[in-house]
Image (cartoon, rainbow, N blue to C red):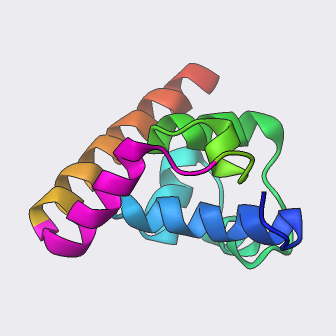
Amino acid sequence: MSEKMPSRVIAENLAFYRKLNGLTQTELAEAIGYSNKSVSKWERGEGLPDILMLITLSEIYSVTVSELIGQTGRCKETNEKFKAYEKDRKTLERAKKKALERAKKQKKKSE
């Protein structure tokens, strides 16, 4: 794990994975039933989502909770997705669509 404070690592990862999936804070917030202010607060490291929300976010982003909180490095698939993100806007749009679909499914499960 990084020498940064754990909450800072988590905050950076939350922003990284949201952006990697092409979501705005508002889109993510609406999809998970939270306010965009909550998402912003998490990404600034001023608060952390609870464990159930970390699980939900990891499922939305198709990563492990360990990756999300910085316990393990990013997997090969994530690194490949990041390279594609930097190159290809269509990949970003597909990732965004999939992430929103997963978020909607998670929200329905929790209701």
Quarter occupied by residue 101: top left
| Overall secondary structure of the magenta section | helix
Q: Name the outermost residue toward the top.
A: 109
Describe residue 81's horizontal placement relative to residue 36 as left or right.
Answer: left
If the image is split into quadrants, where does the N terminus sit? Answer: bottom right
In the image, taking residue 40 as reference, residue 49 lies left or right, namely right
Where is residue 106? Give x, y as percent.
52, 30
Q: Is residue 23 left or right of residue 36?
A: left
* Residue 47 screen position, x and y as percent: 86, 66
Q: Magenta segment range?
A: 73-89
Q: Compare residues 71 and 99 and report the one nearer the observer.
A: 71
Residue at 67% x, 45% y is: 72
Image: 32 above or below 85: above
Q: Is residue 47 above or below residue 21?
A: below
**Residue 43: x percent and y percent?**
68, 72
Identify the residue shown where x is 43% and y is 68%. Answer: 19
Q: Residue at x 74, y 61 (%)?
A: 10
Q: Is residue 85 magenta?
A: yes
Q: Quadrant of residue 2?
A: bottom right
